[in-house]
Image: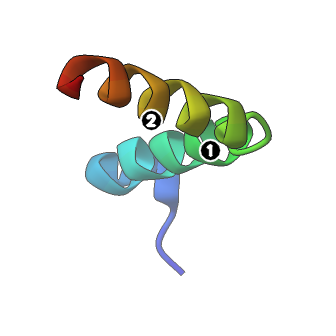
Amino acid sequence: MISIKNFHPLNLLYRRLKILTRSFSNFEGVFQLLSFSLLNCTS
């Protein structure tokens, strides 16, 4: 297996995935916020 730490693009992708999965816990709240702001923009 290739070491992820030595492979830069993969490392960045892995970090981003980590952050994404961490923010998935409050993804519902973010989604509600986004839809709410979108509704405000369109109306």
* Residue 13 in picture, x, y percent from top left: 39, 50
Residue neighbourhood size for the residue with mark 2, other residues' Cα within 10 Å, grouped as few (<14), some (14–19), many (≥20): few
Say how the picture is coloured.
rainbow
Residue neighbourhood size for the residue with mark 1, other residues' Cα within 10 Å, grouped as few (<14), some (14–19), many (≥20): few
**Disc 1 + disc 2, Cβ < 8 Å:** no
Q: Residue at x 57, y 43 (%)?
A: 20
Q: Residue at x 23, y 19 (%)?
A: 41
* Residue 23 in picture, x, y percent from top left: 67, 35
Instruction: Write down the residue under mark 2.
Output: 35
Q: Is residue 4 above or below residue 35?
A: below
Q: Quadrant of residue 7?
A: bottom left
Q: Earlier in the sequence, mark 1 or mark 2?
A: 1
Q: Secondary structure at mark 1?
A: helix
Q: Is residue 41 left or right of residue 13?
A: left
* Label drawn at residue 18: 1
Which sits in the foreground, 7 or 20? 20
Q: Secondary structure at mark 2?
A: helix
Q: Is residue 26 above or below residue 12?
A: above
In the rendered image, the residue lying farthest to the left is: 42
Q: Is residue 8 left or right of residue 35?
A: left
Q: Is residue 8 left or right of residue 23?
A: left
Which sits in the foreground, 22 or 10? 22
